[in-house]
Image: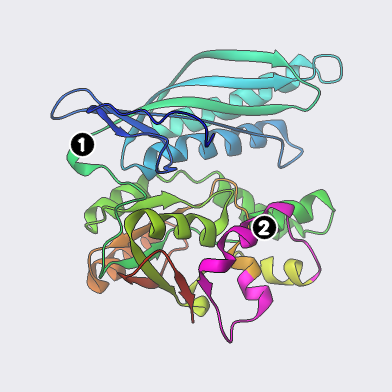
Amino acid sequence: MGRLTPVDHPDLLVGAASGDDAAVWRLDEDRALIATADFITPVVDDARTWGRVAAANAVSDIYAMGGRPLLALNLVGWNTEALPSEMLSEVLQGGQDVAADGGFVVAGGHTIDDPEPKYGMAVIGEVHPDRLLTNAGLRDGDHLVLTKPLGIGIVTTAIKRDMAEPRVVDAALSSMTRLNAVAAQVALEAGATGATDVTGFGLLGHLGRMCAESGVDAVVHVDDVPFLDGARALAEAGSIPGGTGRNLGWIRDRLDADGVGELDITMLADAQTSGGLVFGAKSAEAADAAVRTLTDSGHTAARIGEVGSGTGRIRLD
């Protein structure tokens, strides 16, 4: 990737250079298109539920940019020799469930033969250029809001190891299949200009990239960060996804965590699937109002820290 020539065009509002959630192309003064693609391997045994999780995960990038989804294409890798076509139909129906919930259309797609099944979507959305949220939009004085609890990677790893209790699994699935549509709207109402969704790089990884791109530092109050019930016990039992260690390796040299336990740091780097948004509200009052609105709509949200001037570091306290 580092050897690719950067694309420079006046209508490319967001490209690959900033590592943002999606690409954004300006059509005119009032409209811009958002384009993204994502797919995952199975996280649960039930085919339709996996389809819902994968679709919610893919469309999340549209919401993370402050937009609304319009159109999606299915992306499928399927082992045709080992897996029945009826199961694939269930996966695609799960994607359709999410499309119906999000008000967008699934208009086709592409399937390849693959020993390991994969499913996701390429999604097109729209946004007003003046209401665009980016990972370079955090500002000195912002207050950070997280819209979903962490711990998804811990729980899905426990599912694979048959360690997770049904109530913990149900909570994780409910979180993963919840769309970030409301969260995106709340972020805009809170005056946010910087946002991202918390997925494979974990909270520390995604927030660290935001801080670097925005030219700011962040403070995260560890005790204020919400986690799925049962996630800590599973982490203590060793249910840590491999991606979490890679996340920590990437952020360590820009992380100040004196006095914070190693398990807490690890959980903050937990690799998520279909996680929530983290965004910078314009004031403490706006952040608290956002949390109340999100909580009233069924989210587990919290104000977790602040943004200040700096060079891309995160301090945990």
Task: Residue 277 in the image: state x and y as whole percent.
Answer: 43, 53
Inspect the magenta stretch and tell me whether residue 233 lies in it: no
Answer with left or right where residue 151 lies relative to residue 105.
right
Which of the two residues, 20 or 152, is positioned nearer the viewer here? 20
Residue drawn where x is 30% and y is 46% of the image = 133
Q: Which mark is residue 244?
A: 2
Mark 2 and 1 residues: CB-CB less than 8 Å, in contact?
no
Occupied quadrant, residue 44: top right
Kindly identify the amino acid type of the residue bearing the numbered disc 1.
Pro
Q: Secondary structure at mark 2?
A: helix
Which of the two residues, 184 or 92, is positioned nearer the viewer here? 184
Residue drawn where x is 22% and y is 54% of the image = 189
Instruction: Determine the CA span between mark 2 and mark 1.
Output: 34 Å
Q: What range of the chain is rendered magenta?
A: 237-265
The residue singled out by tag 1 in the image is 129
Q: Residues within 10 Å of mark 2 (few under 14, many from 20)?
A: many
Residue drawn where x is 80% and y is 17% of the image = 84
Kindly identify the amino acid type of the residue bearing the numbered disc 2.
Thr
Q: Earlier in the sequence, mark 2 or mark 1?
A: 1
Q: Which mark is residue 202?
A: none
Residue drawn where x is 44% and y is 39% of the image = 61
Answer with left or right where residue 310 lies relative to residue 88.
left
Which of the two residues, 148 or 138, is positioned nearer the viewer here? 138
Q: Residues within 10 Å of mark 1 (few under 14, many from 20)?
A: many
